Amino acid sequence: MSFTDLPLSPQLLQAIEKAGYSEPTPVQLQGIPAILDGKDLLVGAKTGTGKTATFVLPILHKLLTADDFSEDSKCLKALILAPTRELAQQVNDSCRKYAKGTGFRSAVIYGGVGIGPQVDQIKKGIDLLVATPGRLLDLHKKRAVDLRSIELLVFDEADRMLDMGFKDEIRMVISKLPKREKQPRQTLLFSATLSDNIYKFGKNLLLKPELIEVDQRNDTAEHVEQVIYNCDPERKTEIVSHLIKRSDWSQVMIFSRTKQGADQLAAQLTESGIASESLHADRSQTAREQALDAFKKAEVHVLVATDVAARGIDINQLACVINYEMPYKAEDYVHRIGRTGRAGHKGKAISLLIEEENYLLEEIEALLDTRLPQQWLEGFEPDPMRVVEVSRKNSKSAQKQRAKKRALGKGKR
């Protein structure tokens, strides 16, 4: 089936063709008709499957073909909530790309920048607003945004919103919307993973929703080759530098658990001759946008990012991601490696695993219901006699390691 078989307006079909898309992805094939039918949706789809277009296209169709659509209207009818600034910007860019030349107006608001220009943009009149929850509530408190006419509500990457502690803010946003009995509303909830928390969360938001799950729960990108290298912690930076310099990757995204670690690694790589930038919440919005723009333009080779900052970033044909440290949440592993292997392209995900973090890999494997084979990188083999730092969580792993070292020691005698 092609996009022309979907009941979308000629303007949108022309924009889709211009963007170079011909066949809808599985989530688009199921989601677009359901949204056009007015159904509430609970959608589980891994990153890189085209879920943004799944809700953007039918929302644009509904608003553009409405009897009361007018370029002079100042009635806000659609609200899309996103967890991060980067994702909000990406969604708004998609809206503008598909609606170019139609007179449709959208705006994006998020924290970390001046509120004045955002207020001015909304006052001019918009049909659709993409927002992070906190900044939306700030603007509503100032009476700069009117939510009384919202007919379409979207939660994009709802799992990340919950992870970031936005539940209270979301409840407050919902309380500002008119009751469904007074103002009919269609609600769409999209999530990269469908956990029990998401199902529970969706019960309070969705009315007789249709469930669309195009992949197995917590599945990883099928086009991503996953590699686990056992190593020692003090050699990680050296390993990363070695891997990048010997490869033909045009761009690499590296995940760090901490902001300080991201800054430090980016500086070390740059010093070694690999142009790198860091991306995390402590950097100013201007600095974050400049770093991301430089990475997209290939002006820097490496982007070292934290999980929160990297969520929603879409880089075309990103060849490789590297987990400098294993994530504490197994779901974050799925999101991280989903930055590569997108839209049918092949990708590679490399994880650097130290003995202390074996329990984190076990949690990832339990989530994925598969074993990820471990290996040594030639020339960077871990020291079997290294003392493993013991913590409550990794104590079992550490005990096994100490037992192995005692056996090795006896063998040497």
Image (cartoon, rainbow, N blue to C red):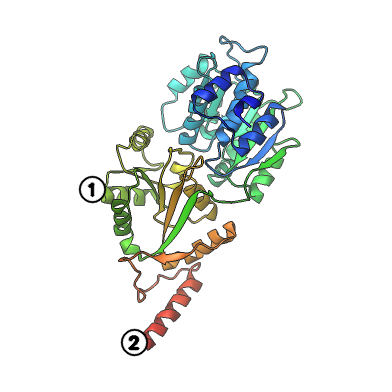
Q: CA distance from mark 2 to mark 1?
A: 41 Å
The residue labelled by disc 2 is 412
Q: Secondary structure at mark 1?
A: loop
x, y percentage for residue 389?
40, 70
Task: Give above or below for 334 relative to 15.
Answer: below
User: Which residue occupies 47% across, 76% down?
Assistant: 400
Residue sitting at the far front: 1
Q: Which residue is nearer to you in this view: 224 or 86?
A: 224
x, y percentage for residue 294?
33, 35
User: Which residue occupies 51% across, 51% down?
Assistant: 332
x, y percentage for residue 51?
57, 36
N-terminal label among 2 and 1: 1
Q: Which residue is nearer to you in this view: 34 or 141?
A: 34
Quarter occupied by the N terminus: top right
Q: Which residue is nearer to you in this view: 180 or 375?
A: 375
Residue sitting at the far bottom: 413
Q: Which mark is residue 235?
A: none
x, y percentage for residue 84?
49, 37
Left or right: 296 as drawn, with respect to 208: left
Residue 128 seen in this snapshot: yes
Q: Secondary structure at mark 2?
A: helix
What crowding class fits label 1: few (fewer than 14 Cα within 10 Å), some (14-19), or many (20 or more)? few
What crowding class fits label 2: few (fewer than 14 Cα within 10 Å), some (14-19), or many (20 or more)? few
Amino acid found under the numbered disc labelled 2: Lys
**Where is residue 412, by image quadrant?**
bottom left
User: Which residue occupies 67% across, 41% down?
Assistant: 212
The residue labelled by disc 1 is 273
Task: Give above or below for 65 relative to 92.
Answer: above
User: Which residue occupies 49% across, 68% down?
Assistant: 392
Quarter occupied by the C terminus: bottom left
Residue 98 seen in this snapshot: no
